[in-house]
């Protein structure tokens, strides 16, 4: 941790480090840090040291849980884990340094108090902006493969069964869903697109031979989806609240 960047923010007049920063710098999962902090919070009279808070991920409206740790809250948490001495001392020294600066800036007049309040607010806003920029830079450097990328990498025709598996469904249930959403209908056991979708190049119908129980040979048409059709289904279903498994998993990880 020779290049450790100590990140302490002043929130509502308190110097705090957030649980996401701790997780990132210790190389731990954030949900594990939250779990450990919530165990500590079961102890009486520590609620003012480990403060519940939320944050947002760029591009999403949902808020996610985090905790803000004061100097005492940070110390209490670090008592519960072994090692990381350099990390511990770097943060404790920084907390002490910031406390000393605040003591030295105690205003002696109303004018000085207003000036100090203005400077502190400016510092808070700058730190918040820096954190948002860092969050965006991290997101830009660590893109995840989307279902859309998977579609573009594949050029083959696909059966409904294969596409249905992408959504964690069986072909029967998936076909029923597409029918309920007004995309296709069945005729003589064959699924066909409604007219407004039929000429878009979304599907190709192939006839396959099969042997009847009496030994004679029969033929039955089967509908296959093109990559253009698969992309249409992805965008259409996403607009109606249905996500493929790969994107559901990404969403869960972000929580």
Image: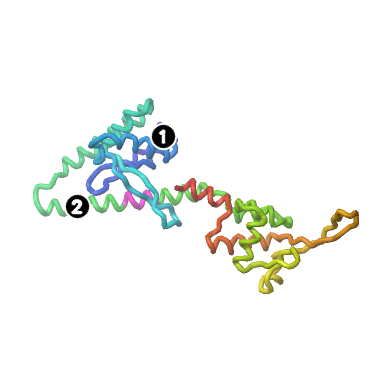
The magenta segment: 126-132
Magenta span: predominant SS is helix
Q: Quadrant of the N terminus?
A: top left
Q: Position of residue 6 (x, y in %)?
A: 34, 38
Q: Which residue is mark 1?
A: 26
Residue situated furthest bottom in the rendering: 195
The circle drawn on residue 117 is 2
- Image x and y of residue 212, in percent: 86, 55
| Whole-number angstrom distance, CA of label 1 to CA of label 2 | 33 Å
Label 1 neighbourhood size at 10 Å, few (<14), some (14-19), many (20+)?
Answer: some
Relative depth, front residue between 199 and 164: 164
Relative to residue 150, is residue 202 depicted above or below?
A: below
Residue at x-position 14% and y-position 51%: 113
Q: Image point 26% across, 36% down: which residue? A: 71
Query: In the current view of this chain or complex, which residue is farthest to the right?
Result: 216
Q: Nearer the viewer, mark 1 or mark 2?
A: 1
């Amino acid at each position: 941790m020779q290049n450790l960047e100590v990140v302490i923010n002043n929130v509502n007049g308190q110097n705090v480090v957030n649980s996401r920063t701790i997780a990132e710098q210790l190389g731990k999962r954030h949900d594990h840090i939250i779990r450990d902090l919530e165990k500590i919070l079961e102890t009486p009279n520590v609620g003012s040291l480990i403060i519940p808070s939320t944050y947002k991920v760029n591009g999403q409206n949902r808020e996610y849980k985090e905790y803000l740790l004061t100097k005492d809250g940070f110390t209490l948490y670090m008592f519960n884990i072994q090692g990381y001495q350099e990390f511990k001392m770097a943060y404790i020294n920084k907390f002490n340094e910031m406390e000393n600066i605040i003591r030295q800036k105690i205003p002696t007049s109303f004018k000085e108090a207003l000036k100090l309040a203005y400077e502190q607010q400016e510092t808070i806003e700058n730190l918040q902006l820096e954190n948002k920029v860092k969050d965006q830079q991290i997101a830009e450097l660590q893109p995840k493969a989307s279902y859309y990328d998977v579609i573009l990498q594949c050029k083959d025709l696909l059966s409904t069964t294969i596409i249905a598996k992408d959504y964690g469904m069986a072909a029967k249930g998936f076909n029923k869903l597409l029918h309920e959403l007004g995309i296709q209908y069945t005729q003589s056991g064959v699924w066909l697109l409604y007219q407004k979708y039929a000429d878009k190049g979304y599907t190709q119908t192939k006839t396959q031979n099969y042997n009847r129980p009496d030994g004679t040979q029969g033929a039955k048409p089967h509908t296959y989806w093109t990559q253009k059709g698969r992309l249409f289904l992805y965008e259409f279903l996403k607009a109606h609240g249905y996500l493929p498994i790969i994107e559901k998993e990404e969403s869960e990880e972000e929580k």
